[in-house]
Image (cartoon, rainbow, N blue to C red):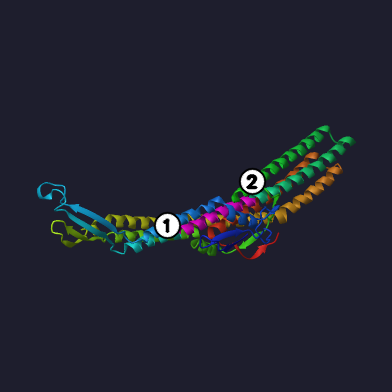
Amino acid sequence: MNMFYWVKPGFRFCLVIVLGYCTLIPITVAETIPKSLTLKQAIEFSLDQNPQLHQFQFVQQRLSANRQTSALKPAYKLSFDLENFAGSGETNGLDNAEITVALSSVLELGDKRRSRSELVDAGLFKAELEQQVATLDLLGELTVTFINGLTLQEELNLASKEVSLSQSLLKAVKIRAQQGSGSDIEVMRARAMLNQSKIRKNTLLQKLKQQKVSVAKYWGETAVNFSNFDGSLYAFSKPNKFKILFDKLKASPAIEVFASELRIKKAGIQLAKSQGSGDIEWQVGVRQYEQSGDNALTLGLSIPLFSESRNQGAINAALADQNAVRYQRQDVMLALHEQLFIAYTQRQQYIETYQQLKTQVIPDLEKALNLTREAYHRGRIKYQDWILAQQELLKAQQQLINNASSALINQSVIEQLTAEPLTIKNTLKR
């Protein structure tokens, strides 16, 4: 199983997981899904069509709009004041009215505009990381779903083999019954076993159809346009050492999100501190005295008092949020370390069990079944011995499939956590 990166419009980079055990063929833009679907092709279709990933473009648009707003300078205001009119005595009418036209705005102190922009920029960067994490999660789910599809195909092949073995058994039992060395009871039991194996095969066939639908949903399709999953369930990569994988986990997008969150909190602290510098409101205008016809300039300043001390609570709250994120990051790091270690050790265990089953257990059981079949034809053993030998072989082959599938699923978890390919150079041969 391999993993690689490529650049995709809309965010810095997108992590694309590809299984090395799948057939690697060039991907071309096509209107129809290929009949034989590789994981690489499924990933391509999902990245282009998955509705969940497309939602992030609206988050980016919203944050970009906020970035434009935060960079704006304080607005200017034009005001019009009319005083000393429509009163009594000398202020009756407009003869003694005073008209003032003024322009006003706010002079921001404490570099508030830069602090606002930095806070929004930190949010944009976090959104990009969250998109990468969401992409990894989605492709991780797709990989597991694809592996389950390969598993069902192998189980279906095994079920076909079981049907074939049961047919051979029924044929042999009928011959023995016709010769008088067997009973009708054995024939009925063999026929029932054959029918049960056919039922299991049909059940797996339906599950495989359902699994194809589960894969197709990742690129937004309800119709299944491919016939089978193309890949090997029995190709395992040779992993890096655990320490190297853990170092990669520390730099993965899942952890970088917390670094980005700390950046947001730091920008929030800076913005809170900037609010401690009171803004100066100014006003410049012209006043006209209707009675004398004279004009005069007006100037106004408004300076808030004690704003720094009044803002200390907001600063303390922002500092507390920053410390909370630091401890949350440590907690998540410990949880991911545990998850990585479990996946790493379980993968090794499943591969070792697979190798023992493949090289030792199954060859012995195959030989035992052949010898049992020959002995039954010669009348040296009972019908039950053949059944037992056949069931033991089928059970071991099912265990082989289960261990191979579990090993690849744990391998997928490791790659999702580290956002790196597990392979170094060598690949275990089938």
* Left or right: residue 380 compared with residue 135: right
Residue reaching furthest top?
A: 184
Q: Is residue 145 visible?
A: yes
Give residue 65's mark: 1
User: Percent position (x, y) of residue 293?
Assistant: 15, 59
Amino acid identity at mark 2: Val
Q: Residue at x 29, y 64 (%)?
A: 110
* Left or right: residue 20 compared with residue 128: right
Residue reaching furthest right?
A: 179
User: Percent position (x, y) of residue 89?
Assistant: 9, 48
Residue 176: name its quadrant.
Answer: top right
Q: Residue at x 21, y 61 (%)?
A: 286
On whether residue 319 falls in the magenta region, the answer is: no
* Left or right: residue 157 compared with residue 74: right
Crowd tier of the residue under label 2, counting other residues whose Cα lies within 10 Å: few below 14, some 14–19, many 20 or above: some
* Number of marks in the rendered image: 2
